[in-house]
Image: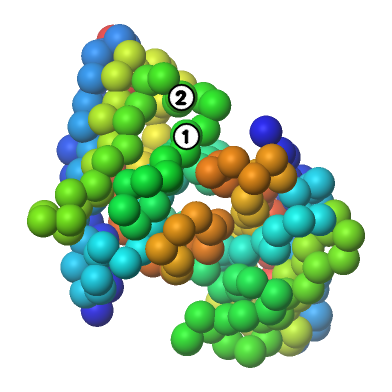
Amino acid sequence: EVQLVESGGGLVQPGRSLRLSCAASGFTFDDYAMHWVRQAPGKGLEWVSGISWNSGSVGYADSVKGRFTISRDSAKNSLYLQMNSLRAEDTALYYCAKDIRSGWSQEFDYWGQGTLVTVSS
Amino acid sequence: SSELTQDPAVSVALGQTVRITCQGDSLRSYYASWYQQKPGQAPVLVIFGKNSRPSGIPDRFSGSSSGNTASLTITGAQAEDEADYYCNSRDSSGNPHVVFGGGTKLTVL
């Protein structure tokens, strides 16, 4: 059974940093691209970042480019999102999602339950 | 970057057919994927590619595309289909970038 479990969310002050983690199991982690998608309270889905199977290709939404960094660790079957210079508008539930392909696609077949990030003073 | 436009809300009578649309320039080059999200739950992939369904998704869900418009059709809508539906696609520039539509709230009457 595929499982994606996010962690690392919490309350953080504007301008501070936070690192999200996503522990993957039930599939060969190295074979698939992975993504972060967020959802602000009461709002729609927003793609944040994605990384190919071998970390050779990464991408970021314009809203987070230069502040967020995505990475993955095959030894730990984990995906990460380092978030720096956080802003109030980054407040959201952050989902980890598995791509159906090794490279890039927009097809996310499994999602975690999300971890909540609240940016407030 | 690209944008995808969806109607904010659509309603359908129980057992009838409903089409939810998604418009954007990137859809001329890439297929849309469709996700169902119920309150308090993570999104679920319902349609991907030309018209493929993941295992476990009922065959009343189907997808199609024409020009810059992708459509999700539910044939014989059920009460449990009431949810938010989102489309997404690759950015038309070809860069590693994904965009979501704003979502459509489906009400089953």
Label 2 neighbour load within 10 Å: few <14, some 14-19, many 20+:
few
* Residue A82 location (% of width, % of height): 26, 30
In the rendered structure, which disc, 1 or 2, sits on the residue that comes first in sequence? 1
Q: On what subunit does the disc labeled 1 rest?
A: A
* Residue B103 location (% of width, % of height): 65, 51
Q: Is mark 2 on a helix, strand or loop?
A: loop
Vertical arrangement, residue B61 with respect to residue B6, above or below: below
Tag 1 near tag 2, CB within 8 Å: yes
Q: On what subunit does the disc labeled 2 rest?
A: A
Kindly give the residue lying farthest to the left in the view shown.
A75
Residue A39 located left or right of residue A72: right
* Residue closest to the eye, A28 or B7: A28
Q: Which labelled disc corresponds to residue B10? A: none
Same subunit: marks 1 and 2? yes
Q: Residue at horizontal 39%, vertical 52%?
A: A52
* Residue B22 location (% of width, % of height): 77, 55
Screen quadrant of the C terminus of chain A: top left
Residue type at mark 2: give it. Answer: Lys
Screen quadrant of the N terminus of chain A: bottom left
Q: Which labelled disc corresponds to residue A65? A: 2
* Residue closest to the eye, A51 or B68: A51
Quarter-wise, where is residue A19 in the image? top left
Q: Which labelled disc corresponds to residue A60? A: 1
Residue type at mark 1: give it. Answer: Tyr
Tell me the CA gap for discs 1 and 2. Answer: 6 Å
Q: What element carries label 1?
A: strand
Q: Residue at horizontal 76%, vertical 56%?
A: B29
Vertical arrangement, residue A96 with respect to residue B63, above or below: above
